[in-house]
Amino acid sequence: MKERGEGSIITATATLDRKTHLERSAFKAQRPTAPQGRLPAVPAAVAAIPAADTRIHPLIRLIEVLVASVVLIATAPLMLVIAVIIRVGTPGPALFRQKRLGLNGQWFDFVKFRTLYHDARTRFPHLYAYDYDDSELQELKFKVPNDPRVTPQGEWLRRSTLDELPNFWSVLKGDMALVGPRPEIPEMLPYYRGEMLEKLSVRPGITGAAQVSGRGRLGFYETVELDVQYVRQRSLGLDLKILLKTVRVCLFGDGAF
């Protein structure tokens, strides 16, 4: 699925320290020329991901488990209602499952509430080609208003961000963190080069720097820049700051569509 949009450049949208922003010209130099035709195999790209310490601090993991457990239990009745609304609204399952890239590029099973028509890939195959040239990548926005694939129920689920509630199951399992870059789809991995791959050296998160700095209005490269910067600066204090900003973003639906 797709999830970025228009927005100001990193210097205008980032919530991180301006003194440590990535140099725009240096980052642009890492931008690859998009592969032509069908997507190639990606083991080489995975191998190029910078090595990272995969150990999780016990306190951080304890907080993640406690928060995820509380959210899943507290919202269980709400999630049941949402599941019924989705099933009654359009044909197909209530949950959407997809392979995503986790820590160090390893695949994991990503789950959220379904917001698209179950046969969207068949009805709109051109939206799943993931075949971009460099100019298209520079303009690429994964979430766009009036997406024909989105169901009527999916529209309000996306605006309210309630479609992401099942993500907490991935946090409970340890595949995701509370804060980190949003998990990328494997089809986009061939477009990552150089320092862009740093984004994949940490666990993906339910929320992250890009989600509180423009979210759906950001483009592909803008999102990756923010994510790489987060990886380089991440700390417990920064995570808490992002979590607090996430509450405001969700309440006002900033960048959600």
Image (cartoon, rainbow, N blue to C red):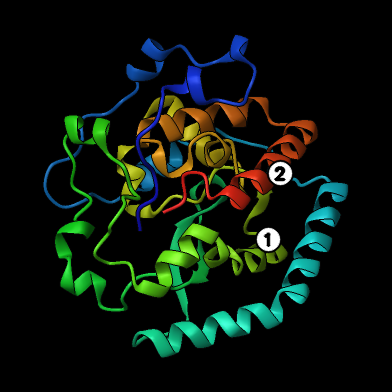
* Residue under the point 79% across and 69% down: 69
Mark 1 or 2: in front is: 2
Q: Answer yes or no: is residue 186 visible.
A: yes
Please name the residue that numbered disc 2 is placed on. Answer: 243
Q: In which quarter of the image is the N terminus?
A: bottom left
Q: How crowded is mark 1: few (under 14 residues within 10 Å), some or many (20 or more)?
A: many
Please name the residue that numbered disc 1 is placed on. Answer: 171
Q: Earlier in the sequence, mark 1 or mark 2?
A: 1
Eyeballing the image, is 189 above or below 13?
Answer: below
Report which quarter residue 166 is drawn in: bottom right
* Residue under the point 40% across and 65% down: 155
Labelled disc at residue 27: none
Q: What residue type is labelled 2?
A: Leu
Please give left or right for residue 254 compared with residue 240 in the image: left
* Residue under the point 23% across and 49% down: 40
Marks 1 and 2 sit apart, C-alpha to C-alpha, by 15 Å
171 or 107: nearer the viewer: 171
Eyeballing the image, is 243 above or below 121?
Answer: above
| Residue 7 placement (x, y as % from top left) | 39, 31
Eyeballing the image, is 166 above or below 191?
Answer: below
* Residue under the point 16% across and 36% down: 133
| Residue 29 placement (x, y as % from top left) | 32, 16
Q: How crowded is mark 2: few (under 14 residues within 10 Å), some or many (20 or more)?
A: some
Q: Which amino acid does label 1 sit on?
A: Val
